[in-house]
Image (cartoon, rainbow, N blue to C red):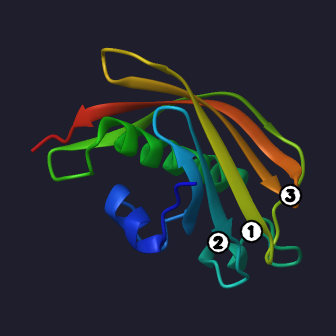
Amino acid sequence: MNSMDIHEVLNHLPHRYPFLLIDKVVDYTIGERLLAVKNVSFNEPFFQGHFPIRPVMPGVLVLEAMAQATGILSFKTAEVQPDQDSLYYLASIDKAKFKRPVEPGDQLQIEVTLVKRSTRGFWKYTATASVDDKVVCTAELMCANRDVPS
């Protein structure tokens, strides 16, 4: 079983607080799949406004956590790390479905599976986010490796 603690996650994602949405990687197989965890705390800044009477993690941030998981697997598979010259950008989200809300105290488990890697730098994934083995969101995501404009 391959895993990554927060320090290795930070080496494979350019994101930082408050936008880093992966706390650790529980398991991965290079070129195939990755299982990551996001511990959802009441202290997350978005809960102040979404929603004060019933805090719910915004669905777009669940999708962003999925996208970050695809980035980690892409970097691991390509055997590179983010640098000043290139990044993996989210290129598309298809067939996103939200099944139930994510609330403070939940542990969001994100599983991404590589479907296709193209020669033009595009990576296609299927993604599922769950809490307590109950699916909260599914989607198909595509990311692309692109040079950062100078």
Give amino acid for label 2.
Answer: Phe
Residue 101 has which mark?
Answer: 3
Task: Find out whether the residues at labels 2 and 1 contact each other: C-beta distance under 8 Å.
Answer: yes
Question: Left of 81 or right of it: where is 99?
Answer: right
Mark 2: few, some, or many residues within 10 Å (few <14, many ≥20)?
Answer: some
User: Which numbered disc, 2 or 3, marks the residue closer to the eye?
Assistant: 3
What is the CA distance from the residue labelled 2 to the residue labelled 3?
14 Å
Q: What element carries label 2?
A: helix
Q: Where is residue 11 in the image (x, y as percent from the top left)?
A: 32, 63
Front residue of 124 and 5: 5
N-terminal-most mark, 1 or 3: 1
Quarter of the image containing the C terminus? top left
Q: Name the residue under label 2.
A: 46
Residue 129 has which mark?
Answer: none
Q: Is residue 72 above or below residue 55?
A: above
Q: Where is residue 58 in the image (x, y as percent from the top left)?
A: 71, 58
Question: Left of 115 or right of it: where is 121?
Answer: left
Residue occupying image coordinates x 82% and y 69%:
103
